[in-house]
Amino acid sequence: MDKRKENKGTIGNKGGRPSVKNELKGVDLASPHVENSFAVLASIMINSDENSRDRIAAAKLLIEYGCGKPKETIENTHNINDFNIKELFKFDNSKPKI
């Protein structure tokens, strides 16, 4: 049974969206530490005594946040031994032979 019918005259989300002020609390708390975070990542990346996995992860984070993640591209032509998969989707619209 649809319970909405029992609540005539009320709107579903009475509380509404939380205020932007509450959403920005995390940003305000983290902002002073951003520069130090990049410095820590850079020192891990440069330090040859660190684990190579940690160095690679630090470098990847610095590149992604500094330059942005690369866009993913998809190759849409699939040829296997001169077989084009697009040929499967071509239909002959001529009348069937009886």
Image (tube, rainbow, N blue to C red):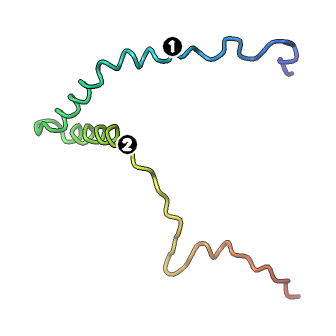
Left or right, 97 with reference to 33: right
Q: Nearer the viewer, residue 79 or 19?
A: 19
Q: Nearer the viewer, residue 97 or 46?
A: 46
Q: Nearer the viewer, residue 92 or 22?
A: 22
Residues at circles 2 and 1 in contact by the CB criterion of under 8 Å: no
Left or right, 55 with reference to 19: left
Q: Residue 17: x and y, percent?
A: 62, 17
Extreme-bottom residue of the structure: 98
Splitting the image into 4 quarters, where does residue 65 fall?
top left
Splitting the image into 4 quarters, where does residue 61 fall?
top left
Residue under label 2: 68
Q: Residue 23: x and y, percent?
A: 50, 17
N-terminal of the pair, mark 2 or mark 1, is 1
Q: Residue at x 85, y 88 (%)?
A: 97
Q: Secondary structure at mark 2?
A: loop
Splitting the image into 4 quarters, where does residue 14 fall?
top right
Left or right, 74 with reference to 51: right
Q: Residue at x 42, y 17 (%)?
A: 26
Q: Residue at x 58, y 15 (%)?
A: 18
Q: CA distance from mark 2 to mark 1?
A: 27 Å
Left or right, 55 with reference to 69: left
Quadrant of the drawing holding the C terminus: bottom right
Q: Residue 55: x and y, percent?
A: 21, 39
Look at label 1 and name its amino acid: Lys
- Point out which mark residue 98 bears: none
Crowdedness near tag 2: few (<14), some (14–19) or many (≥20) residues, C-alpha within 10 Å: few
Quadrant of the drawing holding the N terminus: top right
Look at label 2 and name its amino acid: Gly
Up the image or down, 65 lies above or below 91; here it is above
Up the image or down, 96 lies above or below 14; here it is below
Residue under label 1: 21
